[in-house]
Amino acid sequence: MTDPITCPECEGSKGTRLGRLFLACQFCGGTGQVGGDNEPAERGDQPPPSPPPAWRHKVWTDPWIASQLGCRYCLGSRQVAHVENGHLVSVPCQCVSEEAG
Ligand SMILES: [Zn+2]
Ligand SMILES: [Zn+2]
């Protein structure tokens, strides 16, 4: 048991805002903090290793690749799929509103 700290994964933002969707941070469970009674290392059951979100992939650290692929959220499809309450929904990507606005 340690003092709660700001989640290093989402830096306290609790997740990623994506249009009208809010994807809760998987590391802190959307609380924005870890430690205290929200200690991932003390839950006992290790979650299976999962790849990082696509937009966190290390490929994006390469500026040439990033410029070639365009939007890192939708990869140019202008739509982002997301499971919400058990339903697969597609919403316009944030890059759409950026271009419109
Ligand atoms: Zn987090
Ligand atoms: Zn996009």
Image: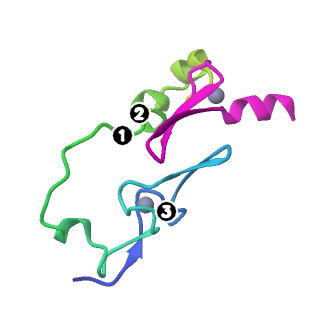
Disc 3 target residue: 11
Q: What residue is drawn where x is 26% and y is 72%?
A: 39
Structure colour scheme:
rainbow
Question: Which residue type carries mark 3?
Answer: Glu
| Near-viewer residue (33 or 92) | 92
Q: Amino acid at mark 1?
A: Pro
- In the drawing, does residue 72 fall left or right of residue 59? right
Label 1 Cα crowd, 10 Å radius (few <14 / some 14-19 / many 20+): few
Q: Residue at x 55, y 19 (%)?
A: 64
The alpha-carbon separation of the residues under discs 2 and 1 comes to 6 Å
Q: Is residue 82 magenta?
A: yes
Q: Secondary structure at mark 1?
A: loop
Q: Where are the magenta residues, as a range?
A: 74-101
From the top left corner, tell me how far across and down residue 43 is, in percent.
Answer: 18, 68
On the image, the x and y values in percent for residue 44 come to 12, 66
Name the secondary structure under disc 3. loop
Res. 97 mark:
none
Residue type at mark 2?
His
Q: Are marks 2 and 1 in contact (CB under 8 Å)?
A: yes
The one nearer the camera, 39 or 3, is 39
Between residue 8 and residue 38, name the one nearer to us: 38
- Mark 2 residue element: loop
Mark 2 vs ligand 2: CB below 8 Å: no
Quadrant containing the C terminus is top right
Which residue is identified by label 1?
52
- According to the image, label 2 marks what residue? 57
Q: Is residue 40 above or below residue 25?
A: below
Q: Earlier in the sequence, mark 2 or mark 3?
A: 3
